[in-house]
Every structure is written in C-alpha cells, then in structure tokens.
C-alpha cells in the first residue's frame, strides 16, 4: 500500500459570524471593566496579528494598567478624591477607550487584508529554473536546447489537456485498484461453494 499522501492545503478561513462575535467580545472587555482588562484585548490582537508593534503595545498597556492602579491606590485622602485617584481613574478609562478603538481598527483591517489575499488552488505550480526551450541537466551533463518542431499548416492545434485531479485522488484510486485486484485473487472459483 501507499503512505498517507499529501495533506490538503491550509487556508481555512474562520466564519464571519465567529470573527464578529470575538471582535464584539474583546471590544467590550476594556469598556465593561472600566479599562482594567484592556491588556486582554491587546493580548488577543497580538496573538492574531503577530505583529511586533502589537506585542509592544500589549506590554505598554500592562505597564499603564499597573501605573494607573498604583496611582489610584496612593491617594492619601480617605474618600479617594485627591488628584492621584482622579488621575488614575481617568488614565484607566482613557487607556481602555483608546485600546478599544485601536483594536477595532486593526482587527477589521487585518481580516479584510486576509480576505483580499488570493486563495490558492490545490497546489501552486512548481517553479522551474529552466526556460521552455531548455531541458534540465541530467547526470552531470549540461542542458541541451530543446527544439520543438514548427507546426505545419495542415496540422490542427492540439486540444488542451484535461485538468489533472489533485494528487491525493489519484493515489486513492491506485490504492482502490490495488485492493480490488487483491480481492479478485482471493475469491474462490464460481463452480465451488463457499469454503467452510
């Protein structure tokens, strides 16, 4: 028998509904937590886009969350009405809002760019370093120019070749043919009954 064959091409696109649901969830995370969990939205964005800029912004949002929390906690007034608590609260809310806007813009652009990328067929054509008039070198000898005969006026153009099926289908066909051949060899002759 043959091996497992070639895997199908990767390029699975997530459903639009799932992308939108995640986008809404992670856009609401900083807003509903008053900016305290804005780093979670940046973590999601950095994992999806894998851009160095987004990883740096994730680190900056984490540092800002700590700074705003420490500033709010260092307010000496008993009812937290000092400038430290106010600055920490305003900074937390503004950080959450700015991260939400940045997340929405970047995530929408990222997914639009992925959808606009051309989808490949089964397998891309193999690139060849040889021109159509050359043959590849064989056994260390230099390539010999390939000369195609010029068509005579009486010859009709050749029909286009039929599209070839993906390699995996051909491999499965060969395995099925081989299996049916093996089963035919094992069947008893028609004049004999079944074996006990």
Image (spheres, grey):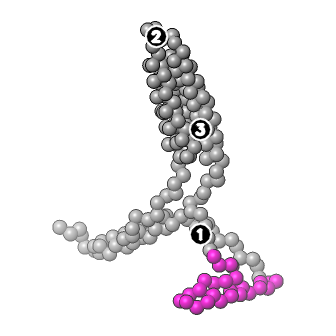
39 falls in the magenta region = no
173 on left or right of 109: left
Residue matched to label 3:
107
188 on left or right of 153: left
The residue under the point 60% across, 42% down is 111
Q: Nearer the viewer, residue 119 or 22?
A: 22
182 on left or right of 112: left
- The x, y position of residue 79, in whole percent, is 46, 8
Residue found at the far left of this picture: 196
Q: CA distance from mark 2 to mark 3?
A: 41 Å
Q: Earlier in the sequence, mark 1 or mark 2?
A: 2
- The x, y position of residue 97, in whole percent, is 58, 25
Point out the frontmost of discs 1 and 2.
2
Residue found at the far top of this picture: 79
* Quadrant where the image shows the C terminus: bottom left
Residue matched to label 2:
77
Note whether 128 is above or below 64 in the view shown.
Answer: below
The residue under the point 29% across, 73% down is 186
User: Secondary structure beneath disc 2?
Assistant: loop
Point out the frontmost of discs 2 and 3.
2
Q: Which stretch did the figure color magenta?
A: 129-154
Q: Are marks 3 and 1 in contact (CB under 8 Å)?
A: no
Residue matched to label 1:
126
């Amino acid at each position: 028998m043959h091996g497992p064959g070639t895997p199908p091409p990767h390029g699975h696109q997530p459903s639009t509904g799932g992308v939108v649901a995640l986008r809404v969830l992670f856009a609401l995370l900083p807003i509903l937590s008053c900016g305290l969990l804005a780093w979670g939205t940046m973590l999601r964005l950095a994992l999806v886009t894998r851009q160095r800029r987004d990883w740096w912004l994730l680190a900056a949002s984490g540092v800002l969350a700590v700074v705003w929390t420490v500033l709010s906690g260092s307010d000496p007034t008993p009812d937290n009405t000092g400038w430290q608590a106010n600055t920490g609260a305003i900074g937390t809310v503004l950080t959450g809002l700015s991260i939400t806007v940045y997340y929405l813009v970047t995530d929408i652009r990222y997914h639009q760019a992925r959808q606009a990328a051309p989808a490949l067929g089964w397998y891309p054509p193999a690139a060849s370093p040889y021109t159509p008039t050359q043959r590849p070198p064989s056994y260390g000898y230099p390539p010999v120019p390939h000369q195609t005969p010029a068509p005579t006026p009486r010859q009709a153009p050749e029909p286009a070749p039929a599209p070839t099926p993906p390699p995996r289908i051909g491999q499965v066909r060969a395995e099925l043919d081989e299996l049916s051949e093996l089963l035919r060899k094992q069947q008893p002759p028609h004049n004999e009954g079944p074996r006990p």
